[in-house]
Image (spheres, rainbow, N blue to C red):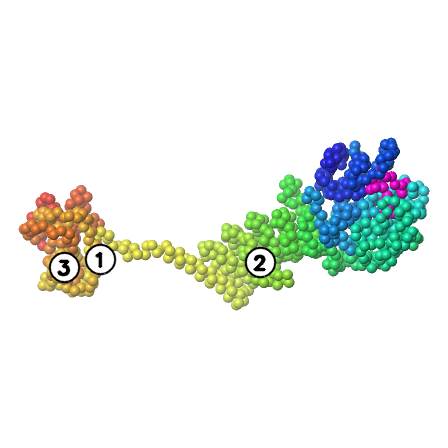
Amino acid sequence: MFSSALKSFQSNIGSNYTLSPHPVSYAGPWKIFDGKKKSTQQAVSVFVFDKRTLNNSNSDTLSFGSKSSSSSGLKQAQDEVVERLKKEASMLARLRHPSILELVEPVEETRNGLQFVTEQVTGSLGGLLKEKDESERRGGGRGHVVEDENGRRRREVEIDELEIQKGLVQIGKALEFLHESAGLIHGNLTPDAVFVNAKSDWKLAGFSFTTPHNTTQPGASSVKPLSVEEMTHYDPRLPAIVQLNVDYSSPDLIIDSDLNPSMDLFSLGLLIIALYTFPHTSPLQTHNSTSSYRRMLTQANTTPNRNNNFLSSRPLPRGLQDTLLPRLLTRRPANRLTAREFQESPYFDNILVSTIRFLDGFAGKTPGEKASFLRGLPKVLSQFPKSVMEKKMLPQLVEELKDREALALVLPNIFAIVEKTSGRMLSEKVIPRLKTIFFPHGHARDQDPKHKHPPTSAEKDSGLQSGLSVILDHMRLIVENITAKEFKEEILPLIHLAMESSNHSLQDKALRTLPSFLSALDFPTLKNELFPVIATVFAKTSSLGIKIRGLEAFKVLLSGEESVDDLNGNTNGRKAKTVTLDKYTVQEKLVPLLKAIKTKEPAVMMAALDVFKDIGALCDRDVVAQEVLPILWSMSLGPLLNLPQFQQFMAVIKTLSTKIEQEQTRKLQELSAPTASGASDFMSFSNGSGYNLSTPGADTETDFEALVTGRLTTKSPAAFDPGWNSSTTATPSPAPPRAQPRITATPEPPTFSWSSQPAQPPPQTRTPMKTTLTPSKPINPFNPPAASAPTLNSFSPLQPASSPPPPSTPPPTPPPPPPPPPPHNPPHPRPSPHLLNNRLDRRRLKTNPQHHPRPPTPTLLLLLLSMGRHPRQQLRRWPPHHPQRPHRHEQRTPQAG
């Protein structure tokens, strides 16, 4: 129904304002909607009256009287009601006072009713008292939360003693203005005529029955006067809420028919009782009957007085019962208090009410009075209810931020209130105001690059600098009560502004607050926005104190930890981990920045040392060795360092050097571990064709002397062992054990002969395998192996060191042995190609795999050397023996050396 009614309104208000779908409160015949102005997003309240409700005689809230009257008379009465309601809205435009409801848009008459726009209100006092009754019936306390039927809006409702005192003082101010300045009387002062705005202020409205009082000179007021009959006439055909409420009326009007200002004070006394009694209604229940009203006031027990507790169902405060109510609910108007005397009652004589009253008139105070008040306000803030601080005091203090000279005094009180109440007020009210003060043209990132404005005149404005200093002092409180996004967008620019200031005190404070807000930053913001500003300040400053603060800030950015203190400010040792600089930024930007330090002051050097400790733990060892350690050595030799400071430098240098040594050693060990076993085999031959030219224990000098003197033949022929393993039947003498060569079977077992083809062995039953000989030691021609058994001379044919293992079956009878070969040109096993020192032999071996060049024996090598001939020349005379066909030089007898 309400939505269809709103759609039918085609007016300026409907096109310029957005209304909530449901009313949030009621005030007499008015429905109150929350609204916002489309152009400015200003929060307002829209009062709507639907004329169709006047025809609804069955409504629970709009009860009508008898329907026997003619339709023409009813139409005239309804028109009078509409005119009276239009007068109520138009009076708000005439009466401008802080305690009177502020009108934003004048009344408009639409096809179906009336509407006008005011400042945002929570609701009427009458509506709040009804909600409070429902809460108390359900067992709730004085403070409760109200949620509408659709759950779209929640609001806190709290009416405590201070709220009542504050509101009554404000109503008293409104009545004083109305009586003394405007020359009017309200005429219908009820809870529905009092509204509570968003700041928890009580505002007076409901001027439907306002008229000049009897002491006003005729023509002095532009308001049309009303007669007593017009005011007290009750039409049962009309709703009671559009007529005078007799329950809150004064006997001056009902009984004496006198229109004087004191009648509003009597109505105010009845309203005060309704605030404390239960249910929260007038103690006079007349049902809008003037005769019932006269009868009640003629009897002592039905007249509100001190003896019957003023007809209140609950005890009243002593100040009200003893001094205030008896002077308001007196029968004779001359004995009543005036509106001015009402405000000066002892009931309101306390520090809290006086503070609020001073704050209400803050705009008219002198700068000295303002400063004294703001300095003393923190002492009494703890005594105020949270609702008063949040709704009344905080918004008014925020408005005072427009005075730049008072920033340093206003901001501490604002932060004190935020700390005691809800942190959401910081985001909703305080931070947007600070943005307009310090960045009147918006942030630099939001401005047009072609038309950039300076962020603020803080460089020359001492008031802004003082305010910025207060903000930095309360940075931890700010971080705890706003989101990370809000901090980055709204508070971080203020920190940059302080760091970039020419005021060293402001820079110092901004750098010291870094640990308190580091947890609110993400890594990209830390690296790309905060670190460059700190680095610029550190590089450009000429103050040693700022240099040290900058180094301390770098340490915080590296460690990313801050101490967590308890409520008493004591550090308990716990750490809160935050984001830190990455390795690349440290190595590429921070280390060069520290390398450029030119001062040799010990304080700066020691602060840099603390930074280098963290850098050494983070950076690669190459950077530490090539960049960090040279810087530390240079700093450690500073002429102003004392012995303990120098020792601290040396301790860090030794620690980093030891770390580099350990890491490099571990790296080299890991790299060399796979190849360590192969280092000794680098010069060995894998195919077993090397020569063992040295024998342990042999006397080289003696052997050589015997060799050249010709006495070597008298000794054992084993002295000239060619180093090849020979197969003999003699029993070897005991010798030190040595590694045996590896023997692998080949398809044909190696056999040797002087000139003829060796006899073919009988067929084997198992699969032949390849044979490889691996000597245990290299051969030394000058140190032949010791004789272990009688051997042949140096020209004896070489036999394999071992024969293949016998077959599993008994071998057949071997054939008769071949004739003995001639004593020259013995066959040799096929050596490896790398031992061939004759190009012809290599070429023959390449073309004929069966070619067997004969390697020189150690004895032959010695003989050739003694004759002055090169072994390679002699080898050319020694053609190899071919097993298949006789060589042309096969029968030639080699020349003796």
Q: Residue at x 74, y 60 (%)?
A: 379
Q: CA distance from mark 2 to mark 3?
A: 84 Å
Residue 585, which numbered label?
none
Query: What is the number of the mark on residue 562?
Result: 2
The boundaries of the magenta stretch are: 230-249
Residue 50 vertical position relative to residue 295 in the rendered view, above or below:
above
Q: CA distance from mark 1 to mark 3?
A: 19 Å
Q: Secondary structure at mark 2?
A: strand
* Three-letter residue code for mark 2: Glu
| Left or right of 490 on screen, residue 343 | right
Could you tell me if residue 199 is visible in this image?
no
Mark whose residue sits in front, 2 or 3: 2
Q: Kindly give the residue lying farthest to the bottom in the view shown.
A: 643
Q: Nearer the viewer, mark 1 or mark 3?
A: 1
Q: Which residue is mark 1?
A: 776
User: What's under tag 1, amino acid-wise?
Assistant: Ser
Q: Residues within 10 Å of mark 2 (few under 14, many from 20)?
A: some
| Viewer-side residue, 354 vs 818 | 354
* Residue 136, horizontal then vertical, whole percent: 74, 52
Residue under the point 77% across and 49% down:
129
Label 1–label 3 contact, CB within 8 A = no
